[in-house]
Image (cartoon, rainbow, N blue to C red):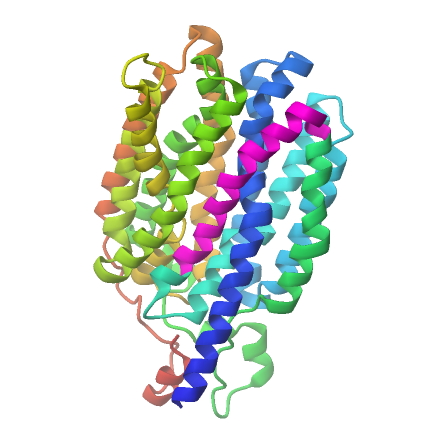
Amino acid sequence: MEQAEASEGRRGWGVISALFLVLVLVGGPNLTLAGVLFPPLLREFHWTHAQVARIAATAAFTTGVLGPLTGWLVDRIGARWLMAAGLLLIGLSDLAISTVHSLDAMAVLFAVVGVGASLSGLIPMMVVAISWFKARRGIATGTVIAGLSTGMTISPPLVTWVIAHWGWRIVMRLLSLPIFFIVIPVVLMFVHAQPVPAQPGAATARFRADENARLPGLELAAALVTATFWMLFAGQFVYSVGNAAVFVHQITFLVGAGYSPEKAAWIFSSQTAFSGLGALVLGALADRVGPRAMLALAMFSHAVGVASLLATASPHLTLVWIVMFDIFWGMASGFGNLMPMLITETLGIRRLGTLMGVIGLCTAMASSFAPIVSGRLFDRTGSYTLPFELAMLLMVTGGTLISLVRPAAGRDRLPVGESAAEAAGSSL
């Protein structure tokens, strides 16, 4: 038994390593791409800040809108082929973006990137990662998120350097290469959820169609009528509006504050380096004190990070403010694993993918309009101060709502008719 558990643990960490690699080579670069492309697109096409923000908004919108469908598919057919299809869409779209010359065409292609990001992103990844671990879910899922921060740290200065020497179109072509030749093969070979143990006497075909039905937790319909779900949804939505209002505009803000594009990219990357450490620290602490407290703390910390970012425009104590931005925004940015953990803790694991997708809608809605609103406020006032201050207020509100979440009744409930012995076998 111990030898089997050790082998299973090694396989689980092999899966975590594969997910880490996907986020380093694809997730991080694509998440930071819109912000890095802001200055060259403004220069080349003379679009407004709001117009360029629309490009990022379309990708975020399609990613989130497809979240419920992605979660439903993951819960029922698994992650491997779903992720491979999404990665293929991203690679092909990156190649196509390198050829376009109009705002509408670029927005459409970034929307397709959003589709691919939904199919291959954190929803399937977190479902897979959580399925392999129980006692150490925080550190395991935190390791996955650390891959995202690693990619976000490496890519902005590298992409900015390539843009300066060869242009943004070459960047888009180069981004597609590791997707086709490294990432998709790795996903097909290594990424899969831990199989649910067979139930004696069960109808095999039925469980193959929907294996998660045997796990503890609420079905979607039952979860949607709980106060727990709506508190999670509201907290994530309010926070996401504030986050999206700031994130895409960070490099543009720094350039406007007098930093060169290269230095602005390095400052942006420095905080993402801290997010990798933050993912591991927050994950480890969540294993001890629970994901609810750590998620609320991360949202509060982001508000302090925004205040520090605004202060970097001051000629006084500039290095201090940059370090504070790195710590408070960067460390807190590693919390992408905490919401899936909190859903599992408060609503159960049975429909984790679907619930992640539904709650992800709030992120999509926020990310689709918040950057545009920030851009328009800048276009009218000539400053990011007002949108960033509003963002801080929203982040604090979101963290407060998350701190009030309590587990729903029935979160540990097993399917009707599941015996105690079978429950022990099917629980992850």
**Residue 115: percent from left, percent from top:** 62, 45
Whether residue 31 is situated above or below residue 53 in the rendered picture: below
Outermost residue toward the top in this view:
381
Q: For residue 268, say whether it is visible.
A: yes
**Residue 61: percent from left, percent from top:** 55, 37
Q: Magenta stretch?
A: 141-169
* Image-based side of 237 in relation to 94, left or right: left
Q: Residue at x 39, y 55 (%)?
A: 142
Q: Which quadrant, please, contains the N terminus?
A: bottom left
Q: Residue at x 21, y 47 (%)?
A: 404
Q: Looking at the magenta stretch, what is its main secondary structure?
A: helix
**Residue 122: percent from left, percent from top:** 50, 52
Residue 147 part of the magenta segment: yes
Q: Residue at x 40, y 70 (%)?
A: 133
Q: Which quadrant, please, contains the C terminus?
A: bottom left
* Image-based side of 350 in relation to 192, left or right: left
- Camera-side residue of 269 and 204: 269
Q: For residue 298, what is the image quadrant?
A: top left
* Image-based side of 363 in relation to 226, left or right: right
Residue 209 part of the magenta segment: no
